Image: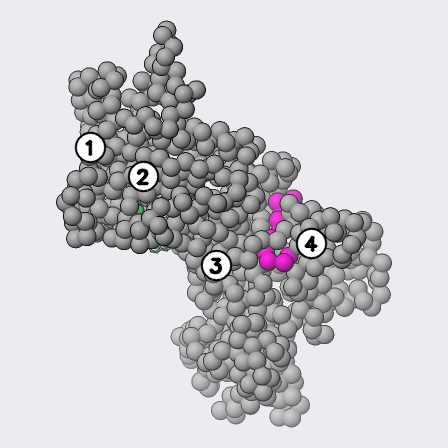
Amino acid sequence: MATTKVDPKLNENNVGKKAKTYQGLTSQQLIDAYRIMFTSRRIDDREILLKRQQKVFFQISGAGHEAMGVAAAFALKPGYDWFYPYYRDRALCLALGATPLEMLLGAVGAADDPSSGGRQMPSHWAFKRLNVVTQSSATGTQILQAVGCAEAGRYFTGHPKAAQKSEGNYRQFKDVQFHGDEITYVSLGDGTTSQGEFWEALNAASNRRLPVIFCVQDNGYAISVPVEVQTSGGNISRLVSGFPNFHFEEIDGTDPVVAYAAFKRVAEYCRAGHGPAFVHAQVIRPYSHSLSDDERLYRPDSERQADAARDPVHRLQMFLLREGILDEKGINKIEKEVEEQVQADADRALEAPVPQPETIYNYVYSPDLDPTSAAFQTHPAPAAQETAADGKRSADSPNKASQNKTMADLINTTLRDEMRRDERVVIFGEDVADCSREAYIKQRQVKGKGGVFKLTAGLQTEFGSDRVFNSPLAEASIVGRATGMATRGLKPVVEIQFFDYIWPAMMQLRDELPTMRWRSNNAFSAPVVVRVAIGGYLTGGAIYHSQCGESIFTHTPGMRVVFPSNALDAAGLLRTAIRCDDPVLFLEHKRLYRETYGRAPYPGPDYMVPFGKAKIVQPGNNLTVITYGAVVTRALQAAQKLEREHHVSVELIDLRCLNPFDWDAIAASVKKTNRALIAYEDSLSWGYGAEIAARIADQLFHHLDAPVKRVAATDTFVAYQPILENAILPQTSDLFRAMKELAEF
Ligand SMILES: Cc1ncc(C[n+]2csc(CCOP(=O)(O)OP(=O)(O)O)c2C)c(N)n1
Ligand SMILES: [Mg+2]
């Protein structure tokens, strides 16, 4: 075994009377480590056999990475610290307390697979009791979530009352546990260090001195791509060495004693609150990338043999023999016991019940709290008065100003009321704070910003910089960290400054946030609210400040999508979003923030609108217009003109919420009017209206007297010059013309 980089203080083997230890590991612990590592390897072997027999459907191994995992688990505390492992961390999970049977249940896709109930590939670990958080296949997404997890631990330590349960909202279903000195472990491969999210995570953890251990398991390859192609200079340690506040370790990860010593040091550093740590471990990958890969196609025998000589299972066996900790008989006994156990567990797994097809819809959304239910229906409080940050009633109440709150006003007020009510609500995003340099605000040198649209103005000043803060300019980081925080029970209400810039967060928004609950079979969830400024009609917004694109998110199961058209609905729907138990994309139309239309008095601190309930803006008999967002006012103007000039009576439906949407309201209206027009601001083809049109055609065909029509933007981007913008976005005149044609059909 290598003895380099050994801390002599840890080595107690020179104390004559004491039992010999190795970097603090006792002989018994080394025997345990061997048993776990051998078990991990044997489960891989068993799964490979079962795959060849077509009894399991995918296999990816932890072979070659076992020593690292055992060492990390021995230095950390399951069920106390938090773990974001990746698919090679089989030995880590076994050492934390997962059982071979649990792993084999995952391999066969059994109903009782604790990681996913047969929904994810094997080796995508989740063990709730051990604080092993559900993992996806997307390389790198776990890293930002781990950062958010660590941030949540720190937040609860500073706000212990926030950890308490409360009734009637998501908190009822989110148990919180935390420890002031907890650590979050996250691992990844060498190839994954190329992902931008890796760098965003290091930056955030470094800057906030978070207790995160980043463990890079460097096996030299990402499938067939060697490390020197991934990483400039071929060594990730060299590239990250400039991050402040980190403790760095670069080790031979095939040596459990060396790895354990490193993990002891980094755990001590993180637990003491000094900051994050980075463990870069050289390991091997003897079984190709997965069973779908044959590394002989791109690695010569010479290279593979050199790796084999470093096999960690073999090395530990040799070490135990050499040190006289076990003799051959002892090794054989362990191996026989492991073989028998893995065989027996595989047999049990093959007999285990499989999940039933009718369960596929379970846990797309929270089974506990239904945001469409009457519990989320309240009425505006008459003559409600706002309370300012200093506790005084709003000075202008109840004069006209307080009767005429804009959407921007009421979103700001709703955020403030919910932050007062629920200490778990935290807000972050780009520019959302009043002023990051607090002293300027405290000394009244500046007034503060509070968002580029001022929607979060005053919140940092009232609630402090640990509840409202600016994030780096990195959208994946905003959503990924929020996901990690929400997994722990916080309620992040984060902001994406412009819909046009949501795309860096797309991996988190599509593959992570809405999948957490379903893919973990309800073991984990992340009910984050993502507020996004969206839409055009801005005169000068152009292509990168005016786009829509909501259908991409309504096409994502697990994600609630809300799009209010007026101040009162925005307040009621935002409160429902914050109190509910699902992730919500809350789309705020920039043009509507300060529109004269749709202003409303302050509805009080408990006003809610349930999801999936449309509003009949105007009842009518001759045709139905289904719309939402900024098109609502334009459609209303067109409908009123049509009534005035042609006596056509239009029923105008504002959907308010796009997922779930109010099919009952649409169906009832179309059955009455027999004509339907769907109007939306996004570009026409493949847009939100396509689904509504298809459903009407499918389910209401016999009620139709005319084809289903759509009015939407052109299939272009939104342009800067107002003449072009007008031609591109649906105008009142376009809506009028389409309604008239439909009425006359
Ligand atoms: C975002 C993303 N891109 C591509 C893939 C396909 N893929 C899965 S594993 C992998 C290689 C990962 O290499 P590395 O990070 O070195 O981990 P290793 O498998 O070598 O342990 C790739 C490209 C993926 N899962 N996710
Ligand atoms: Mg690799």
3D distance between C-alphas at marks 1 and 4? 61 Å
User: Which comes sooner in the sequence, label 3 or label 1?
Assistant: 1
3D distance between C-alphas at marks 2 and 4? 44 Å
User: Residue 201 at what x, y percent from top left?
Assistant: 48, 48
Chain part drawn in magenta: 417-432
User: Residue 730 at what x, y percent from top left?
Assistant: 55, 82
- Residue at point 22%, 19% (across, down): 322
- Residue at point 80%, 60% (across, down): 383
Label pair 3/1, CB-CB below 8 angstroms: no
User: Which comes sooner in the sequence, label 1 or label 4?
Assistant: 1
* Residue assigned mark 2: 282
3D distance between C-alphas at marks 4 and 3? 24 Å
Q: Residues within 10 Å of mark 3 (few under 14, many from 20)?
A: some
* Residue assigned mark 1: 343
Amino acid type shown at disc 3:
Ala
Mark 1, secondary structure of its residue: helix
User: Which comes sooner in the sequence, label 2 or label 4?
Assistant: 2
Magenta span has 141? no
Amino acid type shown at disc 2:
Gln
3D distance between C-alphas at marks 1 and 2? 31 Å
Label pair 1/4, CB-CB below 8 angstroms: no
Q: How many marks?
A: 4
| Snapshot quadrant of residue 374 | bottom right
Mark 3, secondary structure of its residue: helix
Residue at the extreme top: 17
User: Which comes sooner in the sequence, label 4 or label 3?
Assistant: 4
* Residue assigned mark 4: 435
| Snapshot quadrant of residue 413 | bottom right
Task: Identify whether 659 is placed above or below 112.
Answer: below
Mark 2, secondary structure of its residue: strand
* Residue assigned mark 3: 505
- Residue at point 50%, 45% (across, down): 243
